Image (cartoon, grey):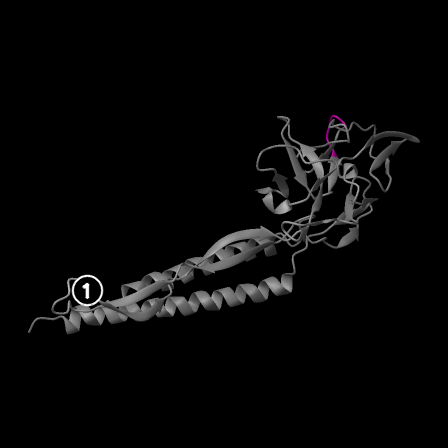
């Protein structure tokens, strides 16, 4: 009976974590460039139950009879971002730049497409990656994210601007007063599922090595669109449905736990009572 406690509790914990993940997705449904997380539930290893038999006369070994398998519950194994392109919507702001996926090769090992990212840098010089093209100009005139990360060009340098009246071509070249001044660097990851999600739409590599320039990968193509922005790829309706399903599963495990608790209470206080 105690094993039932553990199985029901494991189910409740797994559904609680799934609900937290879905809540985070819904909360970021309006966040530019946000990539929704997907959770995978996995069962703990199944145990094979056996009944030990009495030692037969003349034998020194006890025999056993298989009873059957016993599942020991589930857990959320991992959360994986969904790197599908979000909707492209017009904002009319010069500093908003949407990164539009073109041809992305399929990784032969994972059988999934790679992904493209803007390359940004914090004040300490650490490089991070993002899909959020909701940029702005800081007081010093550099092109930055709203969180203060500097947008980098193809040479790995920050991009100084004279004003927000600049133009961005399809390949990311920034033109001011008719003169090209920089090209926005776009990084390519052939296995984005190895990236570490840091929050605020930022990612980093596991080994802190920088990702290659997408233009150095012949099979990759992309374009940029100024005055537009990539929205979140969260499906709100599906997320709400999944959240209700997770809640019902949590509630079912909770009722099982309560039933076990009542059975244990009766076993201790009524069946086991000394008369």
Above/below status of 151 relative to 65 = above
- Residue at the front extreme, as displayed: 58
* Range covered by the magenta-colored residues: 137-141
User: Magenta stretch: residue 67 in it?
Assistant: no
Name the one closer to the observer, 46 or 189. 46
* Quadrant housing residue 233: bottom right
Residue 104 located left or right of residue 70: right
Above/below status of 44 relative to 137 = below
Residue 223 located left or right of residue 74: right
Q: Is residue 19 visible?
A: no
Query: Which residue is found at the position 65% from the left and 54% from the top?
Result: 29
Query: Which residue is found at the position 77% from the left and 31% from the top?
Result: 154
Above/below status of 45 relative to 156 = below
Query: Mark 1: which secondary structure?
Result: loop
Q: Quadrant of the C terminus?
A: bottom left
Q: Is residue 193 visible?
A: yes
Residue 101 in picture, x, y percent from top left: 77, 49
Q: Write down the residue under mark 1.
A: 62
Q: Residues within 10 Å of mark 1 (few under 14, many from 20)?
A: few
Name the one closer to the observer, 46 or 141. 46
- Residue at the right extreme, as displayed: 178
* Quadrant housing residue 191: top right
Query: Which residue is found at the position 42% from the left and 70% from the top?
Result: 252
- Residue at the left extreme, as displayed: 275
Name the one closer to the observer, 54 or 15. 54
């Amino acid at each position: 009976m105690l094993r039932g406690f553990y199985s029901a509790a494991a189910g409740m914990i797994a559904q609680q974590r799934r609900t937290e993940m879905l809540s985070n997705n819904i909360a970021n449904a309006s966040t530019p460039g946000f990539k929704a997380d997907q959770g995978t539930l996995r069962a703990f290893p199944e145990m094979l139950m056996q009944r030990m038999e009495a030692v037969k006369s003349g034998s020194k070994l006890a025999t056993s009879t298989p009873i059957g398998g016993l599942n020991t519950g589930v857990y959320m194994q991992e959360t994986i971002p969904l790197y599908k392109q979000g909707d492209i919507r017009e904002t009319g702001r010069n500093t908003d730049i949407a990164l539009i996926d073109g041809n992305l090769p399929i990784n032969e090992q994972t059988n999934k497409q790679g992904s493209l990212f803007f390359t940004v840098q914090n004040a300490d010089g650490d490089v991070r990656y993002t899909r959020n093209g909701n940029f702005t100009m800081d007081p010093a005139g550099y092109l930055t994210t709203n969180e203060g990360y500097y947008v980098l060009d193809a040479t790995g340098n920050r991009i100084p601007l004279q004003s927000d009246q600049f133009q961005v071509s399809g390949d990311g070249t920034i033109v001011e007063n008719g003169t090209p001044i920089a090209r926005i660097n776009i990084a390519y990851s052939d296995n984005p599922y190895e990236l570490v999600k840091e929050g605020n739409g930022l990612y980093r590599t596991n080994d802190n090595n920088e990702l290659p320039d997408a233009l150095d990968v012949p099979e990759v193509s992309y374009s940029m669109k100024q005055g537009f922005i990539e929205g979140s790829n969260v499906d709100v309706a599906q997320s709400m449905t999944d959240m209700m399903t997770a809640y019902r599963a949590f509630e079912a495990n909770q009722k099982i736990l309560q039933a076990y608790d009542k059975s244990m209470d009766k076993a201790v206080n009524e069946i086991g009572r000394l008369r």
